[in-house]
Image: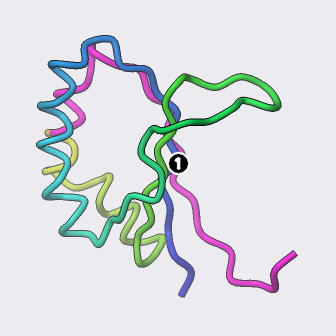
């Protein structure tokens, strides 16, 4: 079964208030098996443009990734980041084929 991923590019406008969102998202991410692979850090936009912060979260399956996002607990966390940040988020299925 392919893993699932959240890939987000975001901008945080109020870092102090954003900490409440980070604290609130921990429980639903853990409950659905989410694991951070990328959480900010150095990066270089080599093609196109993206918001200044990149986050990648791996889940045990695509279904778990969707279930986490749709959960009441995560949606309550999302409410905390509205108005203090802007995020583009894609939930996608991982590749299990041969390496390139």
> In the rendered image, which quarter is residue 60 located in?
bottom left
Residue at the image position 45 percent from the left and 76 percent from the top: 61
Q: Could you tell me residue 23's position as x and y percent?
A: 12, 42
Left or right: 44, with 57 as reference point = right
Q: Is residue 90 magenta?
A: yes
Residue at the image position 56 percent from the left and 80 percent from the top: 2
Residue at the image position 21 percent from the left and 65 percent from the top: 30
Q: Is residue 86 magenta?
A: yes
Left or right: 60, with 4 as reference point = left
- Where disc 1 sits, the SS reads strand
Q: Magenta stretch?
A: 77-100
Closer to the camera, 6 or 52?
52
Is residue 97 shown above or below 47?
below
- What residue did someone put label 1 on? 7
> In the rendered image, which quarter is residue 63 located in?
bottom left
Q: Could you tell me residue 89's position as x and y percent?
A: 49, 40
Q: Could you tell me residue 78's position as x and y percent?
A: 24, 35
Residue at the image position 42 percent from the left and 45 percent from the top: 39
């Amino acid at each position: 079964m392919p893993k699932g991923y959240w890939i987000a590019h975001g901008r945080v406008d109020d870092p102090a208030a954003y900490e409440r969102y980070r604290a609130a998202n921990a429980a639903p991410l853990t409950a659905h098996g989410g694991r951070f692979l990328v959480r900010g850090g150095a990066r270089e936009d080599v093609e196109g443009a993206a918001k200044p912060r990149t986050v990648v979260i791996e889940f045990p399956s695509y279904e778990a990734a969707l279930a986490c996002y749709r959960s009441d607990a995560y949606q309550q966390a999302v409410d905390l980041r509205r108005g203090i940040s802007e995020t583009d988020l894609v939930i996608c299925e991982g590749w299990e084929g041969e390496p390139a």
